[in-house]
């Protein structure tokens, strides 16, 4: 099942999705430790990376 998912969306997209997931987790940890502005700044990276993924996917 996981191998089928990786083949369907591509290895690079899987790596970028893992990066986005890790950014969200790190942002949550930073937010819960009390550094709220830094956590919000880091949280904006995730949709930016997803936007670049869509841009490069549909660019032709």
Image (cartoon, helix red, strand yellow):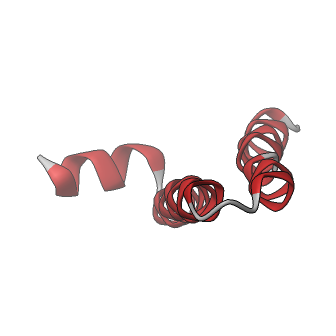
Q: Quadrant of residue 19?
A: bottom right
At 51% from the left and 67% from the top, the residue drawn is 15
Return the residue nearer the eye: 35 or 59: 35
Residue at screen point 46% across, 58% down: 14
From the viewer's perspective, is 10 left or right of 53? left
Q: Quadrant of the C terminus?
A: top right
Give the image location of residue 12, x and y in percent. 56, 65
At a point 56% along the width and 53% down the height, the residue shown is: 28
Residue drawn at x 78%, y 58% is 42
Vertical comparison of 1 with 27: above or below: above
Can you tell which quarter of the image residue 57 is in?
A: top right
Closest to the observer: 26 or 45?
26
Q: Is residue 51 left or right of residue 32?
A: right
Q: Would you say 60 lies left or right of 54 here? A: right
Percent across and percent down for residue 33 are: 59, 65
Q: Which residue is at the far left?
A: 1
Q: Residue furthest front?
A: 34
| Residue nearest the viewer, comparing 34 with 30 | 34
Q: Could you tell me how many numbered marks the image carries?
A: 0
Could you tell me residue 6's position as x and y percent?
Answer: 33, 55
Of 39 and 24, nearer the camera is: 39
């Amino acid at each position: 099942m996981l191998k089928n998912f990786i083949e369907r969306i591509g290895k690079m997209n899987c790596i970028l999705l893992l990066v986005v997931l890790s950014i969200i987790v790190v942002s949550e940890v930073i937010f819960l430790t009390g550094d709220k502005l830094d956590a919000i700044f880091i949280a904006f990276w995730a949709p930016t990376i997803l936007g670049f993924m869509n841009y490069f996917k549909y660019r032709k």
